[in-house]
Amino acid sequence: MLRALIFDVDGTLADTESVHLAAFNHAFSQEGLGWHWSTEQYTDLLAISGGKERMMHFWRSQNPEVTELEGGALTAMMERLHEIKTAWYEAAVNGGAVTLRPGVLALMSEARQQGLQLAIATTTSPVNIAALMRSAIGADWRSQFIAVGDASTSPVKKPHPQVYLQVLRDMGLTAQVCVAFEDSANGLKAASAAGLATVITPNSFTAHHDFAGALRVVPDLTHVSLARLREWMAAALSRATAGAH
């Protein structure tokens, strides 16, 4: 029986990545680094989950001969960059730069009407989540979600399943009665490793990813209803049962 829907945020609930990219480049410019990520570069860098981790990976690729700056200076620089980037992103979202993807609110509404729980499992920061959800749903957005897992509660990033395991634990539910919604290969790996059936809604940054093992890959959530989710889960269970014999 389906009892809960668990949503990733960036790229899944909203097409946020182009705004995140602009925010990173703003931070690089403000700090005078001389970095500027192109869309193509950023698409590749999305293989690294987490903004600080992404910047650290890029710094190391640009400075392969340097092992570490003295006295934690590199970590401090990444923290400063991330603060600048996050502030710019939050202001952009508050200014209406990002909207939820098609079908998101309708599916959430249908789930609540039928008594299902909603949860969030993301590796982004709490500030980013709050900015988006406040803008899209309202100031009381948090009351609509039984559990929220993010970078502050689950520091080990996707494709590790830590955030999904945390959210399942917080909800008190097993993976078998939940469905996850993701947009990337790392997200699919994380959800699958936690035992979750996963629906993928790719975007322009992730359309080239390998989504083998997904419950379904659909353009957006207008193609998803609770009835369809139940049909897809039943079909997957039937195939798994047949394969076991």
Image (spheres, rainbow, N blue to C red):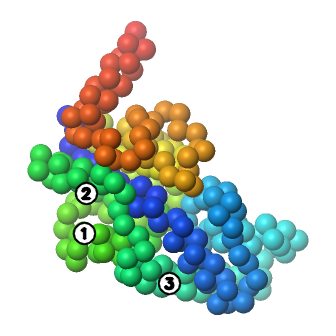
Toward the viewer: 107 or 31? 107
Please state if 144 lies on the left or on the right of 197 as rendered: left
Across and down, in percent, residue 113 comes to 11, 50
Q: Which residue is mark 2?
A: 105
Earlier in the chain: of badge 1 and badge 3, it is 3
Q: Residue furthest right?
A: 65
Q: Amino acid at mark 3?
A: Trp
Amino acid beneath label 2: Leu
Q: Are marks 2 and 3 in contact (CB under 8 Å)?
A: no
Q: Nearer the viewer, residue 88 or 152?
A: 88
Cβ atoms at labels 2 and 1 below 8 Å apart: yes
Which of the 4 image quarters holds residue 94? bottom left
Q: Would you name the residue on which mark 3 appears?
A: 88
What distance separates the C-alpha of mark 2 from that of mark 1?
A: 8 Å
Pointer 1: residues within 10 angstroms few (<14), some, or many (20+)?
few
Helix, strand or loop for disc 2: helix
- Determine the residue positioned at 24% across, 50% down: 107
